[in-house]
Amino acid sequence: MTTREWRIGDLDQIAAIEAESFSDPWTRRMLADSFLSDRFTGVLLEEEGSIVAYGGMSVVCDEAEIELVAVSEMFRRCGRGTKIINDLLELASARGVKRVFLEVRVSNAPAQILYLKSGFRGLYCRTRYYPDGEDAVVMVKVLS
Ligand SMILES: CC(C)(COP(=O)(O)OP(=O)(O)OC[C@H]1O[C@@H](n2cnc3c(N)ncnc32)[C@H](O)[C@@H]1OP(=O)(O)O)[C@@H](O)C(=O)NCCC(=O)NCCS
């Protein structure tokens, strides 16, 4: 599995996976705006010409925040989520990042397990963080 960076032409497929994966997905416009930020890096996995997984993060100084991770439903539980996280961590490390943060819904056990297995640990909860009132768990991984 080899990831590559997002291109403008990928946005429709990424937006479709966002829509199938989240109750509050990033819109195509939000995804497009990521190209305007030199802090943002998006990576994706493509298989037989179709995008099956992607992730995105913003880097500011020595801290990064993973803002997006999703795997198309049919392709889950085969290591693709782990691959996306590992590649974002490698890119962050190469840019001198020391700490990587992310937020995850308290109900999202699959993602929390993936993050714990990737070396993240829970820091604290943000109460009623999401538009529907659900709490977020803030997680961090310290890079060596
Ligand atoms: C969370 C998500 C990205 C995981 O992607 P994935 O490709 O299935 O992840 P992996 O195959 O690399 O899984 C790694 C480990 O995480 C855990 N895991 C992943 N999905 C799980 C599930 N549904 N139930 C329990 N554990 C799960 C397992 O321990 C798994 O290892 P294993 O398969 O060897 O047991 C995927 O479920 C997804 O896209 N969900 C919807 C979007 C989302 O919630 N994104 C995260 C937002 S914070």
Image: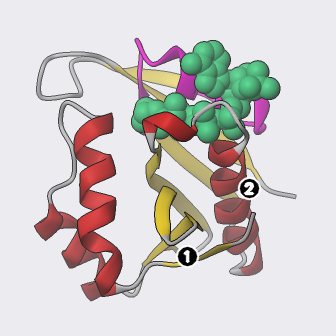
Q: Is mark 1 within 8 Å of ligand 1?
A: no
> What amino acid is labelled 1 in the image?
Cys
Q: Are marks 1 and 2 in contact (CB under 8 Å)?
A: no
Residue at 21%, 18% (x, y): give it: 128
Ligand number 1: quarter of image = top right
* Mark linked to residue 86: 2
- In this rendering, the answer to whether 97 lies above or below 122 is below
- In this rendering, the answer to whether 143 lies above or below 125 is below
* Mark linked to residue 61: 1
Q: Is residue 9 left or right of residue 90?
A: left
Assign the N terminus to one quadrant of the image. Answer: bottom right
- Of residue 41 and residue 75, the one placed in the foreground of this image is 75
Assign the C terminus to one quadrant of the image. Answer: bottom right
Q: Determine if the magenta segment contains residue 111.
A: yes
Place residue 99 in its image quadrant: bottom right
Q: Earlier in the sequence, mark 1 or mark 2?
A: 1
Circle 2 crowding by C-alpha within 10 Å: few under 14, some 14–19, many from 20:
few
- Of residue 72 and residue 119, the one placed in the foreground of this image is 72
- Of residue 63 and residue 34, the one placed in the foreground of this image is 34
Place residue 7 in its image quadrant: bottom left
Q: Is residue 41 left or right of residue 19?
A: right
Residue at 15%, 16% (x, y): give it: 133
Which stretch appears magenta?
103-123
Counting from the top left corner in percent of width and height, residue 119 is at 78, 37
Circle 1 crowding by C-alpha within 10 Å: few under 14, some 14–19, many from 20:
few
Counting from the top left corner in percent of width and height, residue 27 is at 14, 57
> What amino acid is labelled 2 in the image?
Asn
Residue at 75%, 49% (x, y): give it: 142
Q: Determine if the magenta segment contains residue 47.
A: no
